[in-house]
Image: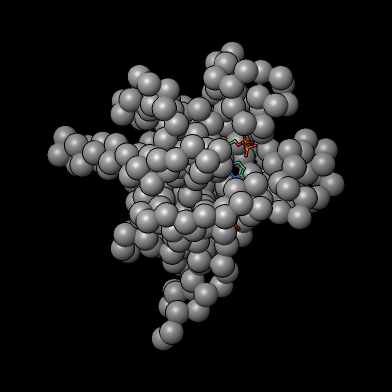
């Protein structure tokens, strides 16, 4: 059966499979920033994002977090459950950077007293604005789904901060998405990668994420390769333990 592409997004293509409840996500080497106003591409990006997402979803599952992950098919492709996505981007932050530094007038790099969770409306036409619970209610998103998003974001943060710390990486902030399966269960979806997280080297402060592309810093291909190396090293050691 020829593959049926259901959706082409900015960073991946999503395909149907013979199993109605299962999707393929094929990660592209393409990158966009600032709501697709800036575009680029570099070798190995799709592989890093697919492989890192697979490794992190697997690890989070072992820690009791429900995810959409089924398995990794090849370097750039993962199989997932098919979900109905909530129109929400959940951002969790440990250190001020990017839009939070602008919002609060903080210097980038200021450590936050406690993790901050933000809920943004996934709508490119509106530039994914941060909304409060009243706005989301108006859009038909249930309070219990928002509560799930916030709790999941904080739980994922609690698990991933020490995971990355062990590899000499500070998890500055990240974005996750949430979807519902056919039985009504909410779970973690989409990807976790240098596209969706800020990673800073613990020793040098060097940025190892998409900010290198957003800010034209150079060394973006090397940074993605380095993050893949650090995350898969943990996986390999974990497999032997
Ligand atoms: P964007 O839509 O932001 O350009 P991508 O290029 O990453 O993003 O495309 C992937 C799309 O698939 C996103 O809209 C994301 O919300 C959606 N998605 C992620 N995981 C699932 C899933 N398990 N089931 C259905 N849709 C998903
Ligand atoms: N992020 C993302 N997709 C978005 C918006 C943000 O993956 O559409 C991630 C981003 O990579 C960072 C975190 O969420 O790790 C916080 O992003 P911020 O709001 O600071 O974004 P900026 O304004 O810098 O683009």
Residue 10 visible to the viewer: yes
Which quadrant of the figure contains the C terminus?
Answer: top left
Residue 175 x/y as whole percent: 56, 40
- Above or below 4: residue 138: above
- Above or below 156: residue 32: below
Q: Which quadrant holds residue 3?
A: bottom left
Residue 181 x/y as whole percent: 55, 58
Give the residue at x 31% y 59%. Answer: 75
Residue 79 x/y as whole percent: 40, 62
Residue 65 visible to the viewer: no
Left or right of 229 in this view: 112: right
Q: Nearer the viewer, residue 30 or 162?
A: 30
Outermost residue to the left? 240
Q: Give the mark count.
A: 0
Give the residue at x 32% y 39%. Answer: 226
Q: Which quadrant holds residue 72?
A: bottom left
């Amino acid at each position: 059966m020829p593959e049926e592409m259901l959706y082409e997004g900015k960073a991946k293509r999503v395909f149907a499979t013979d199993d109605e409840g299962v999707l393929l996500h094929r990660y592209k080497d393409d990158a966009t920033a600032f709501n697709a106003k800036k575009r680029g591409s570099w070798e190995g990006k799709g592989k890093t994002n697919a492989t890192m997402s697979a490794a992190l979803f697997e690890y989070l599952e072992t820690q009791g977090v429900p995810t959409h992950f089924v398995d990794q098919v090849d370097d750039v492709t993962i199989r997932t459950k098919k979900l109905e996505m909530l129109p929400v981007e959940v951002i969790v932050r440990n250190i001020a950077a990017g839009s939070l530094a602008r919002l609060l007038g903080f210097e980038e790099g200021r450590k936050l007293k406690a993790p901050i969770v933000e809920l943004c409306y996934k709508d490119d036409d509106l530039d994914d604005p941060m909304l409060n619970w009243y706005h989301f209610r108006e859009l038909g998103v249930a309070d219990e789904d928002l509560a799930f998003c916030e709790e999941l974001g904080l739980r994922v943060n609690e698990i991933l901060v020490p995971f990355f710390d062990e590899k000499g990486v500070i998890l500055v902030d990240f974005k996750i998405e949430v979807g519902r399966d056919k039985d009504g269960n909410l779970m973690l979806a989409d990807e976790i990668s240098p596209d969706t997280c800020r990673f800073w080297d613990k020793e040098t402060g060097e940025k190892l994420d998409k900010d290198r592309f957003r800010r034209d810093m150079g060394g973006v291909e090397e940074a993605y390769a380095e993050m893949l190396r650090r995350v898969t090293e943990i996986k390999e050691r974990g497999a032997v333990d």
